[in-house]
Amino acid sequence: MPYDADARTGLDPQDWAETRALGHRMLDDMLDWLEHARTRPVWERMPDAKRAELRTPLPERGTGLATIYEDFQRLVLPYGSGNEHPRFMGWVNGGNTEAGLLAGLLVSVFNANCAGRDHAAIEIERQVIAWSAEAMGFPPNAGGILVTGSSLANLIAVLVARRAALGPAVRQAGLRGAPLTAYSSAAAHGCIARAMDMAGIGTDALRIIETDADGRLIPACLEARIAADRRQGHRPFLVVGTAGTVDIAAFDPLEAIAAITARDKLWFHVDGAFGATCAFSARHRNKLAGLERADSLAFDFHKWAQVPYDAGCVLVRDRQLELDTFAQSLAYLQTAERGIAGNPPWPRDLGPDLSRHFRALKVWMTLRAYGAAGIGHVVDHTCEVAQHLARRIDNEPKLERLAPVALNIVCFRYSDAAGDLNEFNHELVADLQESGIAAPSTTTIDGKLAIRAGIFNHRTRFEDADAMVDGVLQLAEKRKRLAAISPAPSSGP
Ligand SMILES: *Cc1c(COP(=O)(O)O)cnc(C)c1O
C-alpha cells in the first residue's frame, strides 16, 4: 500500500501485516541469493535501458514498498560487482556471510547513532576494539574506533602522529611550516599519500623508499633517507610499514622498521588493510612479527575477514594521544556524569566523525559466529587456493607468473600472443569479466600488465581457480582467432 500523507501521521505503515509479509519475503530472497551465489555469472553489465530507467525526477508522491522491491530485484540485484561470488578475484573485496547479512538487518532496526552517549552500541564497539587489540598485539587499553575503511584509518593515524610530533599547538595554529617528512615503501597504498595531502603536510613530504625483489621496504634505504633528510633540516616524524601490499601481498620487515623508529623516536604506523587479518591465523601470524611494536595500525574487517561494507578499524597504542588529537568541547555535545549523556569518552572524541552508524555489531557478530579461528581458517584456505593457482599457472606453457605468491594474490599473464602483451592481457581481463566466468583485475609489475587474482572470498575453491585459468586460456584463443581476422585486436570478442 503506497504511503498517503493525508491519511497518516508519521511514516509507520497503515498495515503492519503487509509490511511483515514483504519483509519475510525479502529476507528469504536475500538468503537464497547468498546461498546460490555460485550458480550465477560473476558479473553482468547493467544494460543502458535499465540505467535509464533509474533516471527519474524526484518522486513527489510515495510508492508502495512492494513495487520498490520489485524494482530492486530487477534493476539492482543482478548488477552488483559480484564480490559475493566465489570466482570474484578482483582487487581486495570481502565476500559477505550469513552473520553479516543478518547483522545488517539488526543494525538498521537498532539505528544507533554511535557518536557517543550511554547505550549498548558503544559498549559493543569498545568490545570489538578490545578484541582487535588482543588479536593484533596491542595493549588492552589501546585507543581505536571503527571507521569506513583503511583509507580513513590511515588518515587518523597520520593525524595522531602529526599531533604527537608537533604538540597541541598544531590543532590551532596548523603546521606553521614545520618541515615534517614521512616514509613508506614504493608499494604502499595510494591512500597514504592522500592522507599526507589531507593532513596538510603534502604528498612531497612522503618519501618513497625502495623495495627489494619481493616488494618489501629495504630498511637500510629507510635509514639512509631519514639521515639525509635530517641533515637537510627536515623533521622526520612517521614511518608507514605495509603488511600486505595491494599488488602482491608483500609484508614490509616490521621488526627492522620498529628498531629504526624506536631509535630515531619516530611514529611507527602499519597499514595492514587486509594483511593484518593474518593475525587470526596460526600459520600466517608470523608475517606480522613486529606489529606489536607499532604505535598505530589501520586494517579492514570488510576485506579478508568477510564483514559486509563498510568496516575499517584504527588502533592507537596510546589512547590519550588519540583523544588529544580529536576531542573537542562543544556546548550542545557535553558529556555528563549520569543520564544518556554519560559514558565518556565517546567515539566522536577518537576520530573525525560525529554521527556514525552501528558498524560494530556486524564485526561483533562475525567474530562471535566464526571465532578468531574461523577467520584464520579463511586466511589459510584462501592462501592454499592461491598456491594451487600458482602451480597451475606454472604448469601452463602459455601463462607466465609475474610475482612470487607470498600469500593470496597471484599475478600472471598470457604470454603466447603476438603484438603488445600489455594490451592483449588488458583486453583479456575485460573479456573474462564480461563472460561472467571469473573476475580478476589487473595491475602493473615491472612495466608488465598483470592479470591479478586476489583470493579473498571464503567461498573460493580450487576448482574456481581452475575455472578462471580455463577461462583465460579459452578466451585468449578466441581473441587470437579474432585478431587474425580483424586488424583491430582491442575490439571485444
Ligand atoms: C584496501 C587497502 C587500503 C584502503 O582501504 P579502504 O578500506 O578501501 O579504504 C589501504 N591499504 C591497503 C594495503 C589496502 O589493501
Image (spheres, rainbow, N blue to C red):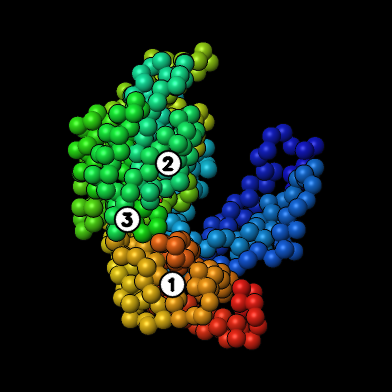
Q: Name the residue: 37% across, 55% down.
A: 304
Q: Which percent across, then down, holds residue 201?
A: 45, 30
Q: Is residue 230 above or below residue 449?
A: above
Res. 277 in view: no
Would residue 86 be found to the left or right of residue 45 on screen?
A: left
Q: Which percent across, then down, holds residue 88?
A: 47, 65
Disc on res. 215: 3
SS type, badge 1: strand
Q: Name the residue: 72% across, 63% down.
A: 48
For this orientation, the residue located farthest to the front is 232
Crowdedness near tag 1: few (<14), some (14–19) or many (≥20) residues, C-alpha within 10 Å? many
Disc on res. 413: 1
Q: How far is the residue under mark 2 from the one under mark 3?
A: 17 Å
| Residues at circles 1 and 2 in contact by the CB criterion of under 8 Å | no
Q: Name the residue: 67% across, 43% down.
A: 13
Res. 43 in view: yes
SS type, badge 2: helix
SS type, badge 3: loop
Disc on res. 192: 2
Label 2 CB, ligand 1: below 8 Å? yes
Amino acid identity at mark 3: Gly
Sequence-earlier tag: 2 or 3: 2
Quarter occupied by the C terminus: bottom right
